[in-house]
Amino acid sequence: NVILNFVSVDTASSNVVHLDWILHQSNPVKGNELVLNKRSGGASGWQTVAALPAASGVFRDEVDFTIEPINEYYLSMTNYCDEPRTTSIHNNMYLTATADTISGSISFSWNHYFGWNHGVDHYELWRKADSEPGLRYLETTSAFENSYSADLAADAFHHTYVVRAVEEGGVSESWSNILSMDFKHSVTIPNIITPNGDEFNQYFHITKIELY
């Protein structure tokens, strides 16, 4: 009777989780009301978030990701035959990362997205670097992977990352929280060069000058 299409973090406002659903009117909802249920951080119990008009189709849940990084949701209802119905359980993705400032490598990880009937087709990592106008596609990982590492730190001072999950055989998508990282890139100016063919100090080169 009701299908929860996706749960997705707002890429413009990272404390907002969007829920989207579709209602099949062949068997109407008793009282024209859906109940939104939520469970945070792997807790055993579910909480009722809101009673929603069945036909509204969307809901915004404000979340403090520093307290509740991963949240699960489902919708429940009763039809006019007094039969209870529930959607599948969906969860948001929470992206984290660690950086090696010596090598310039950044290692990303996120929890898998669950809820779609046929699962996830693939994940995508997107990035905004410094003053770029918006997020740009960076890399794809398979549906079985939830981590990625690459030498990215030296590309910019301020990095913003987000992960996108794409539904297998469908049109839905889910975005993770926004992850921001800042790096200091000190320049090194050589005070001597020795172009003697020994592979050291052959050229006058100022490191990372291209970032300034």
Image (cartoon, rainbow, N blue to C red):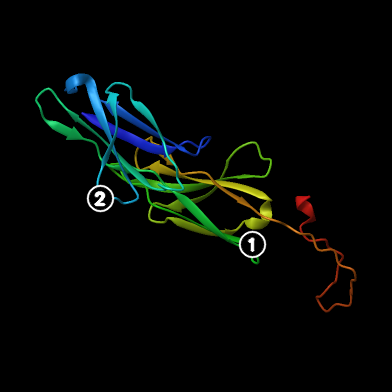
Residue at (83, 79) in percent of width and height = 198
Q: Taking the image as drawn, is residue 25 in sight?
A: no
Q: Taking the image as drawn, is residue 129 in sight?
A: yes
Residue 173 is left or right of residue 104, and the answer is left
Q: Amino acid at mark 1?
A: Gly
What distance separates the C-alpha of mark 2 from that of mark 1?
40 Å
Of label 2 and label 1, which has the lower sequence position?
2
Q: Residues within 10 Å of mark 1 (few under 14, many from 20)?
A: some
Horizontal and vertical percent for residue 169?
34, 40
Figure check: 72 above or below 206: above
Figure check: 174 above or below 59: below
**Disc 1 target residue:** 104
Q: How many dots with numbers?
A: 2
Q: Secondary structure at mark 2?
A: loop
Horizontal and vertical percent for residue 128?
61, 43
Question: Which image quadrant: the N terminus?
Answer: top left
Horizontal and vertical percent for residue 154?
68, 57
Q: Secondary structure at mark 1?
A: loop
**Disc 2 target residue:** 44
Residue at (24, 36) in percent of width and height = 87
Residue at (15, 25) in percent of width and height = 79
- Quadrant in the picture for residue 52: top left
Horizontal and vertical percent for residue 135?
58, 40
Q: Amino acid at mark 2?
A: Ser
- Quadrant in the picture for residue 151: bottom right
Residue 39 vs residue 124, the one in the foreground: 39
Q: What is the number of the mark on residue 112? A: none
